[in-house]
Image (tube, coloured by chain):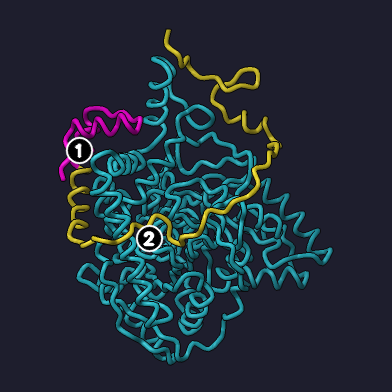
Amino acid sequence: MKIDREQVMRVAQLARLSFSQEELTTFVAQLNTILDYFDTLQRVDTRDILPTSHPVGTDTPFRDDEVAAFADNALLLQNAPSQEKGCIKVPKVIEQ
Amino acid sequence: MTELYSKTIYELHALLAAGEVTSREITESVLKRIDAVDEKVHAYITVTSDLAREQAQRADERIRSGSAGLLTGIPLAIKDNLCIKGIATTCGSKSLAQFIPPYSATVINALAEQGAVFVGRTNMDEFAMGSSTENSCFGPTRNPWNPALIPGGSSGGSAAAVAADECIAALGTDTGGSIRQPAAFCGLVGLKPTYGRVSRFGLIAFASSLDQVGPMAKDVRDAAMLLNGISGYDRLDSTSANAAVPDYTDLLGKEVAGMRVGIPGEYFTSGLDAGIERAVRESVRVLEGLKMEIREISLPHTEYAVAAYYLVAPAEASSNLARYDGVKYGFRGGEEGGLLDMYTRSRSEGFGVEVKRRIMLGTYALSAGYYDAYYKKASQVRTLVRDDFSSAFRECDVIITPTCPNPPFSLGEKLHDPLSVYLADIFTVPASLAGIPGISVPCGFTEDGLPIGIQILANFFREETLLQVAHAYEQNTTWHNRKPPLAPEKDLISFK
């Protein structure tokens, strides 16, 4: 399967990444080389083979949903790039 | 007399227990060593001398009071993707360069409770994506055996720190070989546990169905002791295995005669370096000499493992790394244009090129119209790779392979050829996809004097067997006793 420049730009948008024209050119070439290689998988017969998403296949462990206070709110907030009055500040979300 | 920094965990424990040295003395010896050689090696992103001295003092009090454990007072290096509360944890990324974790990883808490000393945070490929430690926003680490070469990766900083005696042992993490490959390239022992054996809580996620924390050490006994210190169930990790943990030193020194060793033909193909093949074949003869039974086995889907891995791991990474949006923590780009532009700027400026490449691959593999052809197909092939091992372990107790097909390459050599770097993971990714444990042990040197590793694989939760065989091999060879000739300063190019 081949991926063209426009598809790479669309994937970048999905991934919330932006690239310069030069970076795009490099990426299109490299991604195509890698995707070509991935095509070797098409040689494998996987009819009736269940996919593995987890190597050990444990059941979901359940526990009671108990509220526990986090001890260090100040430490959490300290990592926020922008904050005010104990809240995390972001650019305006709702358009007028 | 050998310096304290060059000793093993068990040697130092014996000295500490006998009151012949203090943790303070060992810690100062290691910190001095870091001062002397890290400018050349660049194994560390952060040296945590204050924390280390404080921990050493507490360790000494504990030793005096008679309540010391086997890791009490031992200086360890920690890969920079394991959270330590209050200590910068960068993951080798600009996006986390200012991140101070508000909590510690479970493995960190466990080691701290046992009285271990943390001397520093080791360099790594950004978000553990890479095989060379060149993809770190803090610059590359150099191989202590030859500073022109890469140490391997992504746990290259931990590997180089152990090899250069800049710590007694280290924690690394392994998603597709990131403990085993740098251990092979730097001439040490590195073990990736069974998926679920060691808690991932507080490990900054790369690919959640593959990531495992494991020990990197100067010899097999040290690796077993450190594995003892980090293994076990953790209710904070929903994939943690609720299974009993044996003492991993119990089988060390026990007879291996009669155990069955599988040699998979698929790992000895034309791409394998001749010197490495010779060393691995010679190692097999050593095991044969210990009366182990050698058998040819087949792992027929090996050739598809790299493709499957480089779809599964980036797919999981693209999802895991969606959290780096510059809102709650991490690097925030400019806010002009609104929230979406801020997300895009934060990510585009915060991530390096390899991380972006993998996010792109993963996003593509999961996107509508391509999911079946890529992600689902890769997950099915993963089942086949896993089934290959299940069949093989009906015929043998351990499997022996080379850890890597080639010796370490030069810094900068492969920066523009990502596929060739991915392909070199061929011998380590199959065990990662399957979830089984693997260890790399020194098994010789190339003509250029570079370390070579053999990989030993065992079935789920058979780390004991791995360590038993690795120890038997090690005790009948001398490779692990060699130390790198840290080149004099004048021969080195500065990497600053």
Residue B496 percent coordinates (x, y)? 43, 41
Q: Report if residue B481 is visible in the image.
A: no
Judging depth in this view, the residue of B236 and B4 nearest the camera is B236
In this figure, which residue is indicated by the disc labeled 1? A28
Q: CA distance from mark 2 to mark 1?
A: 27 Å
Q: Amino acid at mark 1?
A: Val
Q: Nearer the viewer, residue B355 or B276?
A: B355
Judged from this view, the residue extending furthest toward the front is A48
**Which numbered tag is attached to residue B433?**
2
Residue depicted at x 17% and y 60%: A43
Q: Is residue B33 left or right of residue B94?
A: right
Provide the residue span drawn in magenta.
A1-29
Residue drawn at (40%, 60%) of the image:
B177
> Is residue A23 part of the magenta span, yes or no?
yes
Provide the secondary structure element on which disc 1 rests: helix
Residue B112 lies in the magenta stretch: no
Residue at position x 58%, y 70% in the image: B222
**Residue appearing at x 45%, y 66% in the figure:** B484
Q: Colour of chain A?
A: yellow
Q: For mark 2, name the chain.
A: B
Residue B79 x, y percent position in the rendering: 52, 51
Question: Left or right: where does residue B17 sit relative to residue A18?
Answer: right
Q: Amino acid at mark 2?
A: Leu
| The chain coloured cyan in the image | B
x then y, percent, for residue B336: 41, 15
Q: Secondary structure at mark 2?
A: helix
User: Where is B489 relative to B403, above or below?
Assistant: above
